[in-house]
Image (cartoon, grey):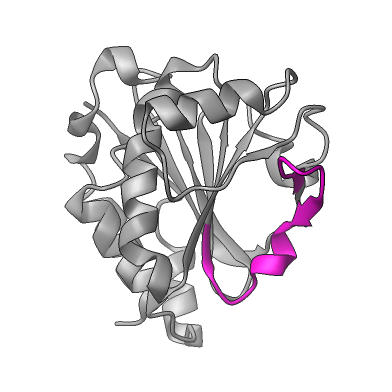
Amino acid sequence: MNLFCQVFLVLTVVFAPLYSGLSHAQASHPLTQWQMSPAPQMAPEAMWIGPDGVPHQLSEYRGNVVLLNVWATWCQPCLAEMPTLDKLQRRYEQAGLRIIPVALDSSGFAKMDLFYRQARIRHLPLAADPSGRLLGPLVADSKSIPTTYVIDRQGKLIGSVVGAEDWFSDNVKKLVEMLLRQEVLTPQEQQTMEQAPLILDVRP
């Protein structure tokens, strides 16, 4: 069984208990949706700026598995999941995982930096899209935060996660490890994916 079939298997079989790690108060929705593409396409270019004002773009990270997390300091579910993103980045940084939390705050980096220090976030970069336009078509259909986009080593968007998650759960780590071991999808496996459900609702 190849990579993307394994991803679908993980999502449809073992992710049901994943959401139980966060309480209702921490969640932006009564459920969290894992939305996986049956035929991953190249992710649209997205941009953001760092604390030094230098712009960065998604294509710079080609060759890594990327989790692009859209959040804000005024979003409580976003703050709740951030420490688990930090732990995930620490665990898999050397293996090629890059987690990029892009804040929608328009008030500058001071508040973001304060939260990072208070929450002891040490392994994630500071990044922002204060205008809400730099991220571009990648987030055009997003209607809530946090939303996290999952992008493979080839730069293909394999799915997105709407709502807060426990990003350091065993099931998430299993998914990340499969993505880090990326293989080429065969036509037969592609056909299997096209027949699979597109959305899994992960309920508490």
**Nearer the observer, 12 or 68:** 68
Is 21 drawn above or below residue 199 in the view shown?
Answer: above
Q: Is residue 78 above or below residue 4?
A: above
Q: Where is residue 56 in the image (x, y as percent from the top left)?
A: 76, 54
Instruction: Identify the image quadrant of the N terminus.
Output: bottom left
Q: Residue at x 21, y 26 (%)?
A: 204
Q: Position of residue 30 (x, y in %)?
A: 34, 18
Whole-percent x, y for residue 124 in the image: 49, 48
Residue at image position (36%, 35%) is: 120
Q: In which quarter of the image is residue 51?
A: top right
Which quadrant holds residue 48?
top right
> How many tags in the picture?
0
* Percent x, y of residue 114: 52, 24
Asked if the magenta segment contains residue 126, the reply would be: no
| Residue 57 included in the magenta stretch of the image | yes
Frontmost residue, 5 versus 124: 124
Residue sitting at 31 percent across and 49 percent down? Answer: 87
Residue 64: tell me if it is visible.
Answer: yes
Q: In the image, is residue 156 above or below residue 71?
A: below
Q: In this picture, is 132 found above or below 7?
A: above
Magenta span of residues: 48-66
In the rendered image, is residue 144 in sight? Answer: no
Q: Is 138 placed left or right of 24 in the picture? A: right
Q: Nearer the viewer, residue 197 or 116?
A: 116
